[in-house]
């Protein structure tokens, strides 16, 4: 045994913290002996607090998928919401600090009726419906979620977008006291996203206010979250406080940070490879690492509904 001499290990050979943490969780997951069933071991602790209140008078959405929904526990334990931390388990553990009432949405830019609107006025102005949508993560995973909400286009029409409005930009709340992940300079805050105006107005595009017939949990993007089911999940911006109609293509958070990996459009396209993994197949959250892979469909299976939006476009160039 050597005591008096220690070899200095180069920093390049030290395993990053997130890697050994993921390995530790994977080993714990494997040792359970139930790789296909023990998702709660891997995905983390149960979300704090009680489930949201039931939303009355829901309509059945006409665009719903016929797939079986992902279990509620998995939907609310595995979240990309970097304002509460980089780990997928962080939002469920930390998002209790978010205050969703009162909540005001600011709408501005190329429109006839800019202004602020409170969450209660928004919710009282639209009949809410339940739609079962699949949402894809970039990292070759997917969920099927019974979202509750209303078409984004119905909200945008209230503000009278002008002929100059070619795009719609969205902005998440910026408040580092409520959102501890914003205390790190890993991204440029606030989180921003955008759609082309015809994408935003398409009836399949949803403003989500709930899931599973209940009010939206904080970690899932309460109280107002975008859902664009034919695009990768990072386009579906959460906890929206600002909407701006613009003439020019707006900046988006991940495209601004890593444009070679995250295009503005972010349409699900199995023929466009992510630089670090293939997009041709995916697994469903909650089914485990050994579950069968599923073939990824163009536009996430919504080609009949939205394919005409991209007629004549080079979908490998405009990825």
Image (cartoon, grey):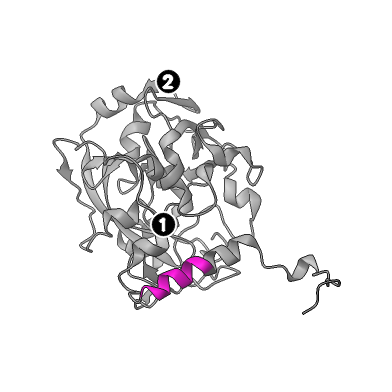
Q: Position of residue 293 (x, y in %)?
A: 37, 77
- For the point 53% across and 65% down, the residue is 22
**Magenta stretch, residue numbers:** 24-32
Residue in the foreground of this view, choosing between 115 and 22: 22
| Percent of width and height locating residue 102 | 38, 22
Whether residue 117 is visible to the viewer of this picture, yes or no, is yes
168 to 233, vertically: above or below: above
Question: In x, y percent, where is residue 266?
Answer: 50, 57
Magenta span contains residue 27:
yes
- 10 Å crowding of disc 1: few (<14), some (14-19), many (20+): some
Residue highlighted by disc 2: 116
Compare residues 71 and 132 and report the one nearer the observer: 71
Q: Is residue 76 left or right of residue 62?
A: right
* Residue 113 in view: no
**Magenta span main SS:** helix
Q: Quadrant of the N terminus?
A: bottom right
> Could you say which is closer to the camera, residue 183 or residue 15?
15
Above or below for 2 versus 237: below
With 86 as the anchor, is 215 left or right in this view? left
In the current view of this chain or complex, which residue is farthest to the right? 5
Q: Is residue 210 left or right of residue 141?
A: left
Reply yes or no: does residue 291 show up in magenta: no
Query: Relative to residue 48, is residue 272 drawn left or right?
Result: right
Nearer to us of marks 2 and 1 is 1
In which quadrant is the C terminus drawn?
bottom right
Q: Marks 2/1: CA distance?
A: 38 Å
* Disc sitting over residue 44 in the figure: 1
Nearest the camera: 185 or 313?
185
Q: Residue at x 50, y 40 (%)?
A: 167
For the point 50% across and 36% down, which residue is it? 172
Identify the element where label 1 is drawn: loop
For image coordinates 58% across by 46% down, the residue present is: 253
């Amino acid at each position: 045994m050597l005591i008096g001499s220690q070899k200095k290990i180069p920093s390049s050979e030290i395993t990053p913290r997130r890697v050994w943490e993921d390995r530790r969780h994977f080993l714990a997951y494997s040792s359970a002996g139930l790789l296909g069933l023990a998702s709660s071991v891997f995905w983390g602790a149960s979300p704090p607090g009680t489930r949201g209140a039931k939303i009355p008078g829901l309509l059945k959405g006409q665009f719903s998928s016929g797939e079986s929904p992902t279990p509620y526990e998995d939907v609310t334990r595995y979240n990309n919401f970097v304002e509460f931390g980089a780990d997928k388990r962080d939002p469920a553990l930390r998002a209790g600090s978010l205050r969703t009432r009162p909540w005001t949405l600011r709408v501005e830019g190329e429109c006839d009726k800019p202004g602020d609107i409170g969450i209660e006025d928004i919710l009282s102005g639209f009949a809410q419906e339940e739609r079962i949508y699949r949402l894809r993560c970039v990292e070759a995973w997917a969920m099927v979620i019974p979202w509750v909400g209303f078409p984004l286009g119905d909200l945008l029409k209230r503000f009278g977008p002008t002929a100059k409005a070619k795009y719609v930009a969205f902005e998440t709340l910026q408040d580092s006291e409520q959102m501890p992940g914003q205390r790190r300079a890993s991204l440029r805050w606030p989180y921003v996203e955008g759609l082309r105006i015809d994408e935003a107005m398409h009836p399949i595009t949803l403003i989500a206010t709930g899931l599973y017939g209940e009010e939206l949990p904080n970690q899932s993007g309460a109280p107002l979250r975008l859902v664009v089911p034919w695009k990768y999940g990072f386009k579906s911006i959460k906890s929206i406080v600002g909407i701006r109609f613009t003439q020019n293509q707006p900046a988006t958070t991940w495209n601004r940070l890593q444009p070679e990996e995250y295009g503005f459009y972010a349409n699900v396209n199995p023929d466009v490879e992510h630089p670090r993994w293939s997009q041709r197949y995916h697994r469903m959250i909650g089914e485990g690492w050994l579950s069968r892979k599923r073939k990824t469909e163009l536009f996430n299976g919504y080609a009949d509904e939205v394919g005409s939006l991209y007629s004549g476009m080079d979908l490998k160039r405009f990825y």
